Amino acid sequence: MMRDMTERHPPARMTLPSVSYGPFRQIGALPWLMVAATMRVIAFFGGLIALPAVVIANIALLLAFVVVTWRMIEVTRGRTSLGDLGFSQQSRMARTVLLPVFGLLIAATIVAAASGLVEQPGDFMLGFDGIAFDQRTDHGRLWSAFVAALVLLMVLQVDEDAKPSLVRAMREFARRAAWLVPAVLVVAAASLLLHPVQSWFRFLIRDVWAGQGVPTNVKVLLSFSYVLIFATIRLWLTVAILVFALRRSYRARPDV
């Protein structure tokens, strides 16, 4: 559980659990991010397969999030049972986490559109996707950072053998706001600083595509690698910052 991450309960020497991620289990979140990136490309071209592709992409992104959370807790010498989840358990967790989260995204998008205060209210619908993939606006990046914090709290409820609850996650966020609000701002700032770097590489990839003499398979490989590398960086940065903030919160307020 998350409380075990505090120094009040120093963990014993750990051995990595055997976790089921198919043939890719030794490389953690990467295969799930590959699936998410591929499905996003398929959804971009539309058609009947677009909606299933979006669903698969988000499930894969959540599973990548869980893997990174598990690894990050272990890196910080904490204890977690997330690595013991089998694929069927992960699938059930994905459903119980994603459904309320997407309800929140829809509600936020409707409110933003009705208020007229936001030029691109659709960015709120991309709140979960923006955890790993670049958002278009600053308010979108801030929203994705907040959504990431809620998702982390819901995932940790699974670690505590509880059914994920968005309401309970919001209450926990409020209790630990002194640490989590700054962490959300730091995540949003990191995403903002990473944006121009990613944009520079995006333009570079476009120049490669426009150039002559470069085989198509090389162009596709470069494009896919570009998306995957930055998705990995964003996801690890996001989880690392939020896990650190939660650990500090439990250390400062163990009674909460």
Image (cartoon, rainbow, N blue to C red):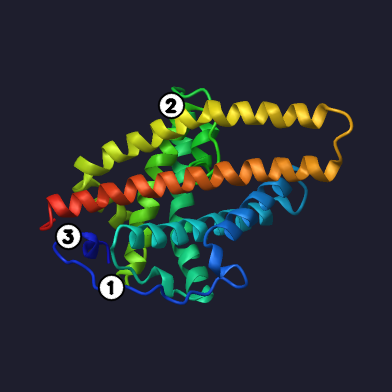
Mark identifier at residue 7:
3
Question: Pointers 1 and 3 in contact (CB under 8 A)?
Answer: no
Please tell me which of labels 3 and 2 falls first in the chain. Answer: 3
Q: Quadrant of the C terminus?
A: bottom left
Compared to 86, does 103 lie above or below? above
Instruction: Give the structural element (helix, strand or loop) at label 2.
Output: helix
Question: Pointers 3 and 2 in contact (CB under 8 A)?
Answer: no
Q: In the visual, does 86 lie left or right of 12?
A: right
Q: How many marks?
A: 3
Q: In the visual, does 210 lie left or right of 102?
A: right
> Which residue matches tag 1?
13
Q: Position of residue 250 (x, y in %)?
A: 18, 54
The quadrant holding residue 49 is bottom right
Taking the spot 55% from the left edge, 45% from the top edge, the residue there is 231
Instruction: Give the structural element (helix, strand or loop) at label 1.
Output: loop
Q: Position of residue 40 (x, y in %)?
A: 66, 47
- The amino acid type of the residue labelled 2 equals Ser
Please say whether residue 131 is visible from this viewpoint: no
Mark identifier at residue 115:
2
- The amino acid type of the residue labelled 1 equals Arg
Please say whether residue 146 is visible from this viewpoint: yes
- The amino acid type of the residue labelled 3 equals Glu
Instruction: Using the numbered discs, state the Cα–Cα distance from disc 3 to disc 2 in whole angstroms.
Output: 45 Å
28 or 173, nearer to the observer? 28
Instruction: Using the numbered discs, state the Cα–Cα distance from disc 2 to disc 1 in whole angstroms.
Output: 53 Å
Instruction: Using the numbered discs, state the Cα–Cα distance from disc 1 to disc 3 in whole angstroms.
Output: 14 Å
Mark identifier at residue 203:
none
Mark 1 neighbour class, 10 Å CA radius: few under 14, some 14 to 19, many 20 or more:
few
Please tell me which of labels 2 and 1 falls first in the chain. Answer: 1
Instruction: Give the structural element (helix, strand or loop) at label 3.
Output: loop
Q: Nearer the viewer, mark 1 or mark 3?
A: 1
Mark 2 neighbour class, 10 Å CA radius: few under 14, some 14 to 19, many 20 or more:
few
